[in-house]
């Protein structure tokens, strides 16, 4: 069965991705994929400045296109999307403001997230009209088809996508209704996005976890048997559940680069003490203001970054007396700045969100 996809790809640097007139990338790439049964010589890639067919190349006149007009496309039978990433945690963003039902099913989302047979992403995010007094509503399907309450890196991408859809410039802030409650992202002057993630949830039954509370109804540095190894864990919810560990009973100082996440991650995620499954963060303390993290995400597996996870990590580090309330958290995809503010108990997440390309595909 033939598949045709069109992709608009910004050719600007990662530091400067906008044009003076629209604030949006202008150059584009088109890609057409053909059935795998065709011989290699039939495959082609078309770009605004060149075309490659098998081993031959010809240079053609560049064609300018505007991502504003691309995002305004309304052809029926096609899904128009933008691909974004926040430190390598990547998402397919869909303009869904005309309906409170996602334009694609969770099964279709699984297919689109497949990195070999689809677009490739950690999840699909839908920008919907606001509900419960919020400016917008965010829904997300993970790469396994499950629906999380919200996503910190995804929220930063959501904010930048909204700014493009609404043609907003400069410092911007709006409210977003999510399964984790009301979230407030703010696009700041340097183009990064700062998100008020609200208050962490620490009560064990609300995280949720079946581990017995050991500190003010919370689970802090409790012992958890994972396949015969005793880990010390702290459980935090940022609207979605997190299990944070700084080491085992035998070894308190993790070297996170040495971990086999693919082996140990699923054992935490599906552990019987986490009725809603859990995200798991493995942490190495570099200083009381600097943490290093690797994450196994519920429904997505090992990812390059997790915003809610970085927030949960700083909360856990403070509760265990390992770090201060303002920290840099290094993830495989890059650093995030996290603050757990004492005066209002809110956690703030700051980091980048970048557009990768725009695309369309038949539904």
Image (cartoon, helix red, strand yellow):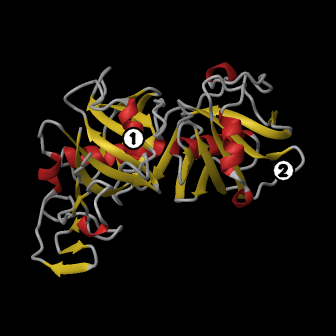
Instruction: Determine whether, in the image, residue 294 is placed left or right of residue 194.
Output: right
Please say whether residue 68 is visible from this viewpoint: yes
Instruction: Determine whether, in the image, residue 155 is placed left or right of residue 264.
Output: left
- Asked which secondary structure carries label 2, the reply is loop
- Asked which secondary structure carries label 1, the reply is helix
Q: Residue at x 26, y 70 (%)?
A: 41
Disc 1: which residue: 111
Q: Residue at x 25, y 62 (%)?
A: 9
Is 142 or 187 nearer to us in this picture? 142
Q: Is residue 315 above or below residue 69?
A: above
* Callout 2 crowding tier (Cα within 10 Å): few <14, some 14–19, many ≥20: few
Q: Quadrant of residue 96?
A: top left
Q: Which quarter of the figure is the N terminus placed in?
A: top left
Instruction: Determine whether, in the image, residue 260 is placed left or right of residue 279.
Output: right
Q: CA distance from mark 1 to mark 2?
A: 40 Å
Q: Is residue 302 above or below residue 269?
A: below
Disc 2: which residue: 252
Mark in the foreground, 1 or 2 = 1
């Amino acid at each position: 069965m033939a598949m045709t996809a069109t992709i608009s790809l910004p050719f600007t640097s990662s530091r400067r991705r906008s044009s003076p007139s629209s604030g949006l990338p202008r150059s584009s790439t088109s890609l057409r994929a053909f059935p795998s049964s065709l011989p290699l010589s039939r495959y082609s890639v078309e770009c605004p400045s060149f075309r490659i067919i098998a081993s031959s190349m010809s240079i053609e006149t560049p064609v300018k296109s505007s991502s504003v007009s691309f995002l305004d496309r309304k052809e029926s039978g096609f899904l128009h999307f933008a691909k974004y990433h926040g430190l390598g945690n990547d998402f397919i963003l869909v303009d869904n403001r005309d309906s409170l039902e996602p334009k694609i099913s969770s099964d279709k989302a699984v297919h689109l997230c497949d990195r070999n047979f689809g677009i490739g992403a950690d999840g699909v995010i839908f920008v919907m009209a606001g509900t419960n007094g919020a400016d917008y509503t965010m829904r997300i399907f993970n790469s396994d088809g499950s629906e999380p309450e919200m996503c910190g890196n995804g929220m930063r991408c959501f904010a930048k996508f909204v700014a493009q859809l609404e043609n907003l410039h400069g410092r911007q802030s709006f409210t977003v209704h999510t399964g984790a409650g009301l979230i407030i992202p703010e696009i700041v002057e340097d183009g990064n996005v700062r998100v008020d993630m609200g208050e962490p949830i620490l009560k064990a039954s609300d995280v949720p976890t079946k581990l017995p509370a050991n500190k003010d109804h919370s689970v802090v540095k409790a012992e958890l048997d994972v396949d015969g190894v005793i880990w010390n864990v702290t459980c935090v919810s940022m609207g979605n559940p997190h299990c944070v560990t700084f080491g085992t009973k035998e070894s308190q100082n993790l070297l996170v680069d040495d971990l086999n996440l693919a082996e140990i991650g699923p054992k935490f995620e599906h552990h019987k003490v986490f009725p809603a499954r859990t995200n798991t963060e493995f942490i190495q303390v570099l200083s009381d203001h600097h943490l290093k993290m690797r994450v196994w995400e519920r429904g997505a597996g090992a990812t390059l970054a997790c915003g809610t996870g970085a927030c949960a990590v700083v909360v856990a580090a403070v509760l265990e007396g390992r770090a201060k309330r303002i920290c840099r958290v290094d993830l495989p995809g890059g650093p995030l700045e996290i603050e757990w503010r004492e005066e209002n108990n809110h956690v703030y997440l700051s980091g980048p969100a970048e557009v990768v390309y725009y695309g369309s595909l038949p539904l």
